[in-house]
Amino acid sequence: MSQVATLLGIKKPIIQGGMGNISNAQLTAAVSEAGGLGTIGTGTMNVSEIEAIILETKRLTNKPFAINIPISVHPEAEKIIELIFTHSIPIVSLSAGNPSPYIPVLHDRKVKVMVVTGSVKHAKKAQESGADIIVAEGVEAAGINSPFETTTMTLIPQIVDAVTIPVIAAGGIADGRGMLAAFALGAQGVQMGTRFVATIEAPFSEEYKKRIVDATDHSTMVVGRSIGRVRRVLDGEYAKSIFYREKSGITIEQYEELTTEKQHRIGALEGNEQEGFMNSGQIAGLIKKIPTVKEVINRMMEEYEQQLKYLSGLKI
């Protein structure tokens, strides 16, 4: 068993990425029930909305699950932390901001802390601040990404060499081959988002799932690059309109108005790509079926073992 699995109290080192305001109890619980670590992303939801999802998740599973807090995005991070204590959530992932003020507070209540980062510099700072695990996310990942735009394959080994705590690889992973590659680079677990969107339990629009299944290797695009607000999405009509607005010049304020969680929900939950966008990682081109979460995770473990066996017998 990997150190990540042991630390997090899970059977399989597969973690669900935080999905912001489209997070839900059904998918979170399904990932945890299948042996991975489900995650509720808080996005910009109010505390009562988050608490309702926590309670429903606890009704659906007694397995561990995590809460993701995008520090610089959510206006009430401290209240979410109180909620975490109230409901005895064992694991928190911190992203999009400086985690150092929050880690000691969480550790005082025995909460494990994962910190999501896209650079070696920030990974080292997170370790110095007391993080238990680093989630190293490459630019292949869905949604908001680091403006450094470092790829997963180059980021993972550099962070592994720079820190002594366990590293989870995120971005561009959807099967057992990707997991084995991440482990070969030094990671001890993987985080996935797009692969879990296209599952039976995920309560997203059928159009969103179909778009992922129908995707090719060039069906995603990056918006926000011109102003340092990198986000990877499917190349729908609304997403393209943002891209072309950038070409003509756009302020950060205008960009943020076009990419709120409201437009995210319109795309993902309503399947409306004329008025909203759908987050997606580049790995969408590899996804061709909509199985159950359990089937995804079990198949990944089988593929991992098969590929490992194949490589162990390969002579170079």
Image (cartoon, helix red, strand yellow):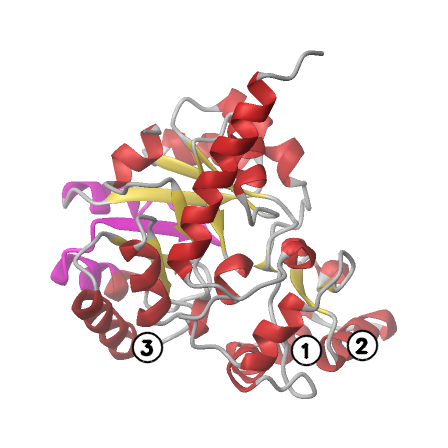
Real-space Cα distance between discs 1 and 2? 10 Å
The residue most toward the top is 316
Q: Judging from the image, what secondary structure is the residue with disc 2 in? A: helix
Q: Mark 3 points at which residue?
A: 46
Which residue appears at 86% of the width and 70% of the height? 247
Specify whether residue 154 is painted magenta: no
Residue 268: x, y in percent? Answer: 55, 77
Image: magenta residue range: 81-108
Question: Considering depth in this image, is 244 or 121 the residue closer to the camera?
Answer: 244
Q: Which amino acid does label 3 sit on?
A: Asn
- Whether residue 66 appears in this view of the structure is no
The residue most toward the right is 248
Residue 219: x, y in percent? Answer: 75, 64
Real-space Cα distance between discs 3 and 2? 30 Å
Question: Considering depth in this image, is 167 or 97 the residue closer to the camera?
Answer: 167
**Of callouts 3 and 2, the N-terminal one:** 3
Badges 1 and 2: C-beta atoms under 8 Å apart?
A: yes
Which residue appears at 16% of the width and 42% of the height? 110
Q: Judging from the image, what secondary structure is the residue with disc 3 in? A: loop
Q: Mark 1 points at which residue?
A: 254
Q: What residue type is labelled 1?
A: Gln
Identify whether 184 is placed above or below 12: above
Q: Which class describes the residues within 10 Å of circle 3: few (<14), some (14-19), or many (20+)?
A: some
Residue 141: x, y in percent? Answer: 60, 53
Q: Tell me if 214 is positioned left or right of 308 in this view.
A: right
Q: Quadrant of the N terminus?
A: top left
Q: Mark 2 points at which residue?
A: 245
Identify whether 97 is placed above or below 314: below
